[in-house]
Image (cartoon, rainbow, N blue to C red):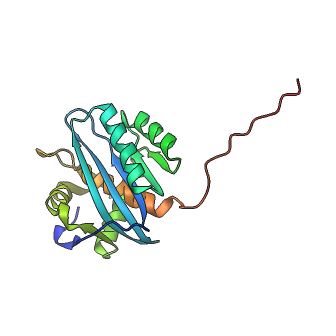
Amino acid sequence: MLDVQLLKFEEIKPNPNGQYFLGMDVGSTGDRTVFAILEKMNKNEGKLADVIVMRKASYQEQLDTLKQLNEKWKFKGGYVDSVGIGGPIAEFAKKINFKIQGFYWTATNKTPAYEDLRAAVFDGKIAFNKEFKNLIESDFRNVSKIVTSAGQIKYQAGRDENGHSDFVSAAVLAWQAAKKISVLGAPPVVWQRHSAF
């Protein structure tokens, strides 16, 4: 995907006044579930503050961790991978925090989302917590950019003993959420028609 030497690592400490966004890549059996927590600095800059990795976690363990992280970081928004078993988890996330939404990967939205994170790395717009340097570098190395004979760009996550480049996917989701979900607003109003009887 890119030269890992371009990744910018810093010592990142929690900011009590920070605006935090979640990216969650939901793992199936044998894969990792990864939570990426990103602090939005301004419209086009962010810091990847924390990463939580779960291996072979049960459905309930993932829900419990999601709830705990929401309480800790008070997310201003987030995207949860809603493909497959991620669907019910995304629905649960929306119930505990209406600003966390499901993100369904498609052939249409995957490449632009990955390209957006890649551009942010190239431009130095995103910094990563150096505490997770080995994990982050390993996952970025496993993502390949493929250009088809028709000139289409695709991203393919390689697999190693750690999983399926789940961190990169979670980071892409957190970055997209920070850019696209407004921190303003209120939960949708459920209108009820008053009965005439």
Do we see residue 149 in this rendering? no
Residue 15 position in % (x across, y down): 37, 68
> Viewed as shown, does residue 51 lie left or right of 191?
left
The residue under the point 38% across, 65% down is 39
The residue under the point 45% across, 42% down is 93
The residue under the point 26% across, 51% down is 52
Residue 165 position in % (x across, y down): 22, 50
Establish if 151 lies above or below 34: below
Do we see residue 122 in this rendering? yes
Q: Quadrant of the N terminus?
A: bottom left
Q: Residue furthest right?
A: 196
> Viewed as shown, does residue 193 lie left or right of 39?
right
Q: Nearer the viewer, residue 45 or 98?
A: 98
Q: Nearer the viewer, residue 84 or 95?
A: 95
Residue 149 position in % (x across, y down): 28, 54
The residue under the point 44% across, 62% down is 178
